[in-house]
């Protein structure tokens, strides 16, 4: 099959969707060896089928703000592919959310979920609602209005949403409360729930911890570990803060974090007490990094430049949002001797940045593999909910670690087997695709 022609057609069929086009192009760029080895994939037109979401739902969300004004937002759920399990993927509440962004995220989610070794399909959803600056009551009313519609389309064996940007423990709580009220059913319909009402230990930490476990296995392959190593991290949300925590626990140092207004630099490295304060500031008080820097001597704050310019690091973990690390940033990292870029966020590196990093011999851990620890632990939450049981922190952490090791090995080995040694992005794409494509063929033309 002519992959260039496939990408061209996918772009023509999905105009005005640059993020989705980017994700499809990146994915297709590594598939040639898989299609060569599996001619049946072309015969069954798997590529053409896999880029079409099975179902997309768009709905109006109307709610009253604290001034009793009617607010109108858009809500979506993209149910992309359930060949290997119920649709699974987060909800994002952010003003930049649109169908292109959700289709890119849902598409990536199919292959990420396939890599986790768990039976999970791919989906994504969200709204252009911005929780920032809204009161708790406003967030609650919005979440309730959102669930009034979403409830018809989800279920523990159908589609199990989770959190993402702008959707944390608070939002999952309000969404879950409304689902329970509407359906009179207490089920594992959402993951990321509170620990006393069906949530899993380690779920909040899982994406960040998982990205660092992935990095540890990449380092181990080169005979190295994190002890004494220095990391640059972007973002200061769920993924970034727990990635920082795990770097510290593994003997490394974290020099930077960022939010959408600016970034902090701690030349001596952030310490555990500071991370504990940051969790309180970001998750409870919903504060900004500028406030954190003001309260800590030796931590500077800047709204100019990016964390990637800081010297002295060996690892970089982009953990904020898509396309935040561009080619020029990649060149800064390369010039400063960074040897590992591990994506905590989804598609945080632009295609040009990825090429520059790979050409320079930097080990690149793609998000669909490196940040799969979150959804994997969501899968473990679903398993605990089905069994009406709860596993200890230690048990979930061990399972998470072994899943991340498996994912790393699968990416590295698949890359090797398909003639792309060292190319973890190709390994991730091929391994995820082969699994989903095979399931689709086995289930016939549906
Ligand atoms: P959070 O909402 O907890 O944090 C997001 C962080 O990124 C915040 O610091 C936010 O800054 C910053 N950010 C968001 N948008 C932008 C932007 N446009 N420009 C600059 N900074 C921005 O989200 P998560 O930590 O959950 O998610 C981060 C990334 O990880 C996303 O790409 C998400 O899809 C991905 N991911 C998350 C998983 C999870 O389990 N949560 C699982 C797998 C992937 P500010 O506070 O100023 O908005």
Image (cartoon, grey):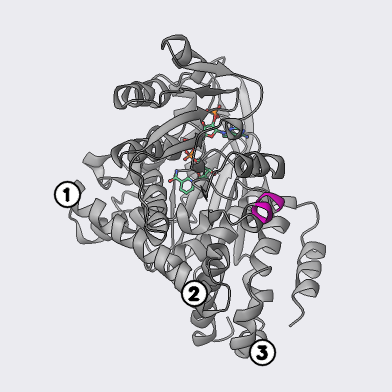
Query: Is the residue under label 2 in contact with that under label 3 (CB below 8 Å)?
Result: no
Rate crowding at label 1 as few (under 14), some (14 to 19) or many (20 or more) other CA atoms within 10 Å: few
Q: Residue 130 bears which disc, if any?
A: none
Q: Residue at x 28, y 50 (%)?
A: 186
Residue 381: percent from left, percent from top: 30, 54
What is the C-alpha distance between the residues marked 2 and 1? 33 Å
Residue identified by numbered label 1: 392
Q: Residue at x 52, y 63 (%)?
A: 424
Quarter-of-image position of residue 268: top left
Could you tell which of marks 1 and 3 lies nearer the N-terminus?
3
- Disc sitting over residue 43 in the figure: 3
Q: Quadrant of the N terminus?
A: bottom right
- Asked whether 53 or 57 is in front, the reply is 53
Q: Which residues are magenta?
A: 352-356
User: Compared with residue 93, is residue 260 higher up or lower down, i.e. above or below?
Assistant: above
Q: Quadrant of residue 80?
A: bottom right
Name the secondary structure under disc 1.
loop
Q: What's the magenta bit mostly, secondary-structure-wise?
A: helix
Secondary structure beneath disc 2? helix
Task: Quote the CA–CA distance across marks 1 and 3.
Answer: 47 Å
Q: Earlier in the sequence, mark 3 or mark 2?
A: 3
């Amino acid at each position: 099959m002519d992959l260039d022609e496939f990408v061209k057609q996918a772009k023509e069929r999905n105009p005005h969707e640059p993020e989705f086009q980017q994700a499809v192009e990146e994915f297709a760029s590594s598939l040639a060896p898989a299609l060569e080895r599996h001619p049946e994939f072309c015969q069954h037109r798997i590529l053409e089928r896999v880029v079409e979401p099975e179902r997309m739902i768009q709905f109006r969300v109307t709610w009253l703000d604290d001034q009793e004004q009617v607010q109108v937002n858009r809500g979506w759920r993209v149910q992309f592919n359930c060949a290997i399990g119920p649709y699974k993927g987060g909800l994002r509440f952010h003003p930049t959310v649109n169908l292109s962004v959700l289709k890119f995220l849902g598409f990536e989610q199919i292959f990420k979920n396939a890599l986790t070794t768990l039976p999970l399909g791919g989906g994504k959803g969200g709204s252009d609602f911005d929780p920032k600056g809204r009161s708790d009551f406003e967030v609650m009313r919005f979440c309730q209005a959102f669930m009034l519609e979403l409830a018809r389309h989800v279920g523990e064996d159908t589609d199990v949403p989770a959190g993402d940007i702008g959707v944390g423990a608070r939002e999952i709580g309000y969404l879950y409360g409304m689902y329970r009220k509407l359906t009179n059913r207490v089920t594992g319909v959402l993951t990321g729930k509170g620990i006393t009402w069906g949530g899993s230990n380690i779920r909040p930490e899982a994406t960040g911890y998982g990205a660092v476990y992935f990095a540890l296995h990449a380092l181990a392959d080169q005979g190295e570990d994190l002890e004494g190593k220095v990391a640059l991290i972007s973002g200061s949300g769920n993924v970034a803060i727990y990635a920082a925590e795990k770097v510290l626990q593994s003997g490394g140092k974290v020099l930077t974090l960022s939010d959408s207004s600016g970034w902090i630099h701690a030349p001596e490295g952030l310490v555990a007490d500071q991370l504990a304060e940051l969790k309180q500031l970001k998750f409870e008080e919903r504060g900004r990094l500028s406030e954190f820097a003001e309260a800590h001597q030796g931590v500077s704050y800047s709204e100019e430049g990016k964390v990637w310019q800081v010297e002295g690091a060996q690892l970089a973990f982009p953990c904020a949002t898509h396309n935040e690390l561009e080619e020029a940033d990649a060149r800064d990292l390369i010039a400063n001797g960074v040897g590992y870029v591990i994506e905590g966020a989804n598609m945080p590196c632009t295609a040009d940045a990825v090429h520059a990093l790979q050409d320079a011999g930097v080990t690149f851990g793609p998000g669909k593999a490196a940040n799969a620890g979150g959804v994997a632990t969501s899968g473990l939450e679903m398993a605990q909910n089905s069994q009406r049981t709860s596993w200890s922190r230690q048990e979930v952490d061990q399972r998470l670690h072994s899943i991340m090791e498996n994912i790393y090995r699968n990416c590295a080995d698949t890359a090797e087997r398909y003639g792309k040694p060292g190319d973890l992005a190709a390994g991730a794409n091929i391994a995820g695709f082969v699994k989903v494509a095979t399931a689709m063929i086995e289930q016939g033309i549906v």
